[in-house]
Image (tube, grey):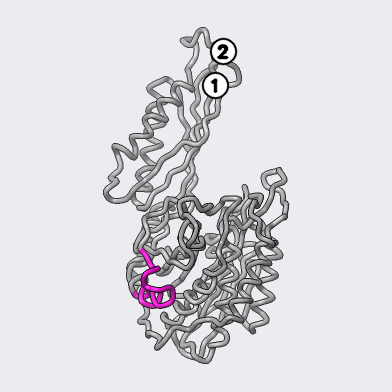
Amino acid sequence: MKKLMLAMAVAAATTLSLPTAQAQQSPAVIDDNLESKVIEWRRHLHANPELSNREYETAKYITQHLKSLGLEVKTGIAHTGVAALLKGNGDGPTIALRADMDALPVTEQTDVPFKSTVKATYRGNEVGVMHACGHDTHVAMLMGAAEKLVNMKDELNGNVLFIFQPAEEGAPEDEEGGAELMLAEGLFSDAFPGYSPERVFGIHVWGGFPTGHVGYRKGPLMASSDSFEITVKGRQTHGSTPWNGVDPIVTSAQIINSAQTIVSRQTNITKAPAVLSFGIVEGGVRNNIIPDDVTLIGTIRNFDMDIRADIHDQLEHTARHVAAANGAEAEVEIDLGYPVTVNNPELVDEMLPITKTIAGADKVKEVPLVTGAEDFSYYALEIPGMFVFLGVTPPDQDMDEAPSNHSPYFYADEDALRTGVDLYVNWALESM
């Protein structure tokens, strides 16, 4: 049922009628003073990262800034999430702008003067904490956009909802979080009654992409991300007499091989690419004992919600029947992760002109599908959404050698921050 609902939501999000945008005479851009503030905020956040659902000080820092601007602020959404509403003078739509706040359990290896030395506990172990995915830049850019738009309040023919979201990297085990929980707790409905947003925008900085360049794509952009666990149950016996038991290791090998044909032979990859990968194979304790069971754990990535559901069904069918053919049993659990991130094509077309004006036409490029996942997808299931990549790798670097997001060496060129703020501001203005 959840799969069907998600598929229906994608269809709705990509066919909703959009409010008519009134093009601005010229783009609204931030000045050097505000850019300096954005950089200062970013460096503070980078030096003080917090893990998912633990963004307590980050939330306080953001809240203090938003309240200083005179905005109506709601805190504690999805544990640590912050939302603020800017009411304009006209009767135009409410536009949502989103940034994510959490950092990763990564020990920073860069040599920037504001590098993180923060330690925290993650899965019972002490780890370094780093904004290795650039969420510090996202927050700083949206804080800057809030200040710029507040200063333009009299010119706004609509309203702006600023979303500072926790746990994009995933909530800790046995916890909920992120965009899905923010929506479940009424972000688009109850947080500010009467001001439900009609479209939503997001930016993600990207390593290996030149500073200030913008990557976009209509329709599917980032993959769904699901995990699975297969428990193969046999019957333990001595390795010298395998006929006295049921071998879950051999059975698991056959399941792994057979599962590879789900994508290569059973999935229509002309419609959308898919990936099914095994990452963990665990079983056995001794060289001469055939064990009772084996555990297989992996991931499924896909760009079409219907194909996503089919792959789930095919994996369960394959595992159970291959196991049965060997006299074993297979239990299959599939954990639905983030859905496909889908950009509304009409919204992208509408925003491309101003995006090219801000970044430069030669720096705005259509990008290939990305098999990584993003929980911005949940917002775009509810209302038309647009999510883009913003390059943060200095142009004099080899893009192929640049540290990627999630690397302990990830580096974000702060020259890109002005572009990000200007994009947020002008997408909102163009939507009113």
For badge 1, the amino acid type reads: Asp
> From this viewpoint, which residue is outermost toward the top?
240
Circle 2 residue: 288
Picture coordinates of residue 215 (x, y %)?
41, 63
Q: Is residue 353 magenta?
A: yes
The residue lying at 50 percent from left, 21 percent from top is: 234
Circle 1 residue: 292
Whether residue 127 is visible, yes or no, is: yes
Q: Is residue 318 magenta?
A: no
Disc 1 element: loop
Picture coordinates of residue 356 (x, y %)?
38, 74
The residue lying at 52 percent from left, 60 percent from top is: 180
Residues under labels 1 and 2: Cα distance? 13 Å
> From this viewpoint, which residue is outermost toward the front?
396
Closer to us: 31 or 182: 31
Q: Main secondary structure of the magenta part?
A: helix
Q: Which residues are magenta?
A: 350-365
